[in-house]
Image (spheres, rainbow, N blue to C red):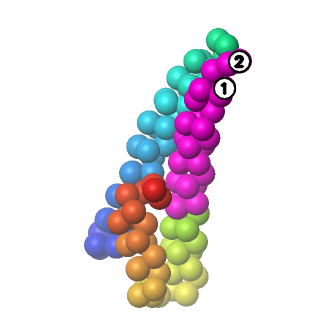
Amino acid sequence: MNKLQKFIEEVVNNVRNDREVTKRLLDDAIVYLSKDEERHREVGIIVAKYVETLQRSNDQLVKISALIQKGESKNTSLSDIDKEEIFDIIQSGGVDE
C-alpha cells in the first residue's frame, strides 16, 4: 500500500469515527429535545452543528471518491493537485472549523 492509499484509508477511518461520535451526540440531543419544546431554543444551534459535521464528512467522502475515480479512469496515478486536495482534507482533521 503506497503512502497516498494510507492517507486515504486514514481519512475514511477518521470520517467514520467522527460520524459515529456525531451520531451518538445527535441521538442524545434528540432525546433531550423531545422532552420539552423550550429546549429547542436552548440547543437548536448545537444540533445544527452536529448535522453540519455529518454533511461535511459526506462531502469529504465524495471528494475522495471523485479523486480516486478520476485517477482510475485515467488509468494513471493522481495528479499533484489531486494529492494536495486529499492532503488538505487530512490536514483539516476531517472537520472544517
Residue 75 on image: x %, y %: 51, 86
**Residue 12 visible to an observer of this rendering:** no
Q: Left or right: 46 with respect to 9? A: right
The front one of 74 and 95 is 95
Q: Is residue 16 above or below residue 25?
A: below
- In the rendered structure, which amino acid carries the disc numbered 1? His
| Residue at disc 1, secondary structure | helix
Q: Residue at x 60, y 38 (%)?
A: 45
Numbered circles on residues, count:
2
Q: Residue at x 53, y 48 (%)?
A: 53
- Left/right placement of residue 86 relative to residue 56 reads left
**What is the crowding at mark 2: few (fewer than 14 residues within 10 Å), some, or many (at least 20)?**
few
Residue 69 visible in the shown view? yes
What residue is rendered at 63% in x and 33% in y?
44
Magenta stretch, main secondary structure, is helix
Image: 77 above or below 97: below
Tag 1 and tag 2, C-beta contact below 8 Å: yes
Q: Which residues are magenta?
A: 37-61
Relative to 88, say whether 28 is above or below: above
Q: Which residue is mark 1?
A: 40
Question: Which three-letter amino acid code belongs to the residue tagged 2?
Answer: Glu
Q: Position of residue 10 (x, y in %)?
A: 35, 58
Residue that mark 2 sits on: 37
Query: In this rendering, is residue 24 above or below 69?
Result: above
For label 2, the SS is loop
Instruction: State the residue at coordinates (49%, 30%).
Output: 25
What percent of the width, then of the height, locates residue 78? 45, 83
Q: Is 69 covered by the magenta stretch?
A: no
Label 1, label 2: how far apart the Cα atoms are:
6 Å
**Residue at the top extreme?**
35
Quarter of the rendering occupied by the N terminus: bottom left
> Would you identify the image quadrant in which residue 12 lies?
bottom left
